[in-house]
Amino acid sequence: MSSKDKSLSSKTKSSKKLGDKSIGIVWSRWNEDITIPLKDGCIKTLTKNGLNKDNLILIEVPGAFELPYGAKLLLGQQKVDAVICIGCVIKGETKHDEYINQTVAQSISMLGLSAGKPVIYGVLTPNDKQQALDRAGGKYGNKGDEAAITAIEMIYLSEQLPKNQSSIGFN
């Protein structure tokens, strides 16, 4: 959610249970004072919703730019039902944040489409550090919780719909 007025963080419990599902989390070390609480919130919400910790695969990458590659590794080398990408790119004095954010968002989107599995964008794109802290367990909740709930909902959505044998260009 992009608005401070809307938050899924209050919804950390889903009616769907994860049970034997397997979820990968790729998280960025850059801005780890933000990304560790996001990752921890995500894990807490997943386990609260029945995920067996043995079915949780964590990959740490240096920065947000490396999140798509980490997700690709998980999708290609592990049996996962979803991948959650956790990161934070804080606006600086240059336009680096715009280039990184756009590339990461597009890459994560394309990975999900090409893999046919949910790849969740849990990357904060705040203007300053305080905005990031507010969204990593602060006054606007924890966006890691929201990423976990989104993953749960998308896993079950993909299982509810009938499998179509035809393709629209993605496998």
Image (tube, grey):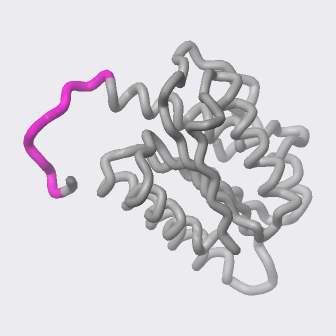
Disc count in the image? 0
- Tell me residue 168's x, y (percent): 15, 51
Q: Residue furthest left?
A: 166
Q: Residue furthest top?
A: 15
- Tell me residue 36's x, y (percent): 81, 54
The structure residue drawn at horizontal position 51% and vertical position 66%, both measured from the top left corner, is: 68
Q: From what the image shows, is residue 170 above or below residue 99?
A: above
Q: Nearer the viewer, residue 102 or 115?
A: 115
- Tell me residue 26's x, y (percent): 61, 57
Q: Is residue 130 left or right of residue 146?
A: right
The structure residue drawn at horizontal position 87% and vertical position 47%, both measured from the top left corner, is: 134
Looking at the rendered image, the quarter that the N terminus falls into is: top right
Where on the picture, by quarter, is residue 61? bottom right
Q: Is residue 154 left or right of residue 99?
A: left
The structure residue drawn at horizontal position 70% and vertical position 33%, both measured from the top left corner, is: 6
The structure residue drawn at horizontal position 31% and vertical position 22%, both measured from the top left corner, is: 160
Q: Is residue 112 left or right of residue 63?
A: left
Specify the segment rendered in magenta: 160-169
Is residue 166 inside the magenta stretch? yes
Is residue 145 inside the magenta stretch? no
Q: Residue furthest front?
A: 54
For the stretch drawn in magenta, what is the main secondary structure? loop
Q: Nearer the viewer, residue 3 or 11?
A: 11
- Tell me residue 82's x, y (percent): 47, 43
Q: From what the image shows, is residue 102 above or below residue 139?
A: below
Q: Nearer the viewer, residue 164 or 19?
A: 19
